[in-house]
Image (cartoon, grey):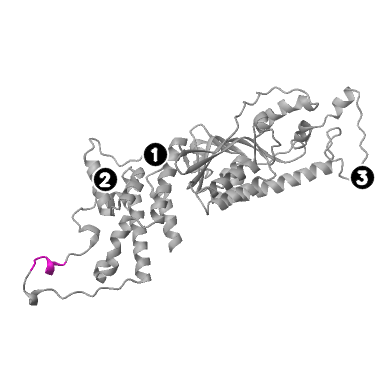
Amino acid sequence: MQLLHLASRLYGTPLLIARTKLDVILSVLGPRIGLPERDAALPKSIPKATTSTAQPGIAIIPVYGTLVRRAMGLEVASGLTSYAEIAARLDAALADSQVSGILLDLDSPGGEAGGVFELAQRVRAANDIKPVWAHANDSAYSAAYAIAAAASRLTLSQTAGVGSIGVIALHVDQSVKDAKDGLTFNAIYAGHHKNDFSPHAPLSPQAATALQTEVDRLYDIFVEQVAQMRGLDSDVVRATEAGLLFGDAAVAAGLADAVTSLDQVLIEFSNTLAVQRSMATPSAAQSRHAPLARASPAALQTTPPISSQPHLHLEKTMNEPEDNIPLDETTSEPTDDPAAAPTPQFVAPVTAASATSTARNGRIEAQAIAEICLIAGSPQRTAEFLASGMTEGQVRRVLLDARASQPDITSRITADAGTTLRPENSPVVAAVKKLNAKEM
């Protein structure tokens, strides 16, 4: 009975699955439900998926195999993963205080349409609580891509593919085979469309129209949701024509953000989370700025945002006074003459506005530090510098000293770094900017 139930979920119903995988499934189930055998490679056995934490604070949720709304206890036997199981793991990660970020590890051809769009919306909503990233390792097609696109960052391995943004439905007409087998099926029914998708009769024109209408409706939902999640025009998504895109082609089409390995993704994610934690709590750098709110107004100068020409900003002169605080020459020499003593400056009281300004200045400096580290090819050191409480000038000096000690000085960031020379493409810099925007 379970096989018959699965057959009813394969035929005459729209699916969000790659066609090649559908053929494999039919080759396995077909002979067991009365259909002729088909030549296709048998699916590999997929182990039971479990949530893991390869990096402290990051929960990895596996999205493997064919995706269904309800697995009915057949996960291990049939290589299925249910949307309900993925949602439960997502909720558990959100509720776990030890988890700061969630990574979806995808290797799936897609599956059923029912329930996938609701799950994608839950993934997008989860981003407002904890950042959710996705990594195609080694495939994220159709329904799996609908889920992956809802993440705030989507990467794929060098051999991985994404896409297959389309909908497919099959109808099997075995009436000729029935006749050869001496079988005649007579359906007694009420309601004109009750027998529309019977496998024992040809597909009627009205049934074909009804099925095509539903396929088109689901396709519109799929396209619009991907366009919204990925920030693309819907015409661009439709132009993929449900094709499979691999590597850099997927990035160029806007369906993914970078080509990188799972290990590198975990490192980037860990660094981004470290930056967010540093921004969420007062750091040593912010504490050092706090006395400025009680000093003279002239001392409230802040470090400006990073220059539009990053290489000039990184190598600017190091002779500037630390933190751009002007020096008072009248107090440089001590004196015992009361008359020669400088007039005490007015000390501004600490107010809510000055405290807010101080916190904002700290965030601006944190963003500048993150961008400097990216330009210098050391984005992994951002969290280290923020935690140490170093200022932008001090970080610049450390990085320049490190560059000077290298025999071959270069500021180029390789593709292996999982980013580009443009700061806005760095997940670390993006995280800092996002936190700054929330406070504005």
Picture layout, residue 267 above or below residue 305: above
The disc, 1 or 2, on the residue closer to the chain's N-terminal end is 2
Q: Which mark is residue 417?
A: 1
Viewed as shown, does residue 198 lie left or right of 9?
Answer: right
The disc, 2 or 3, on the residue closer to the chain's N-terminal end is 3
Magenta residues span 328-334
Viewed as shown, does residue 167 lie left or right of 331?
Answer: right
Q: Amino acid at mark 1?
A: Ala
The residue carrying pointer 1 sits among few (fewer than 14), some (14 to 19) or many (20 or more) residues within 10 Å by Cα, namely many
Q: Residue at x 57, y 53 (%)?
A: 125
For the question of whether residue 303 can be seen, the reply is: no
Q: Amino acid at mark 3?
A: Ala
Q: Residue at x 33, y 44 (%)?
A: 381
The answer to whether marks 1 and 2 mark residues whose Cβ atoms lie closer than 8 Å is no
Q: Which mark is residue 190?
A: 3
Q: Quadrant of the N terminus?
A: top right
- The CA distance from mark 2 to mark 3 is 79 Å
Picture layout, residue 336 above or below residue 115: below
* Residue 147 in which image quadrant: top right
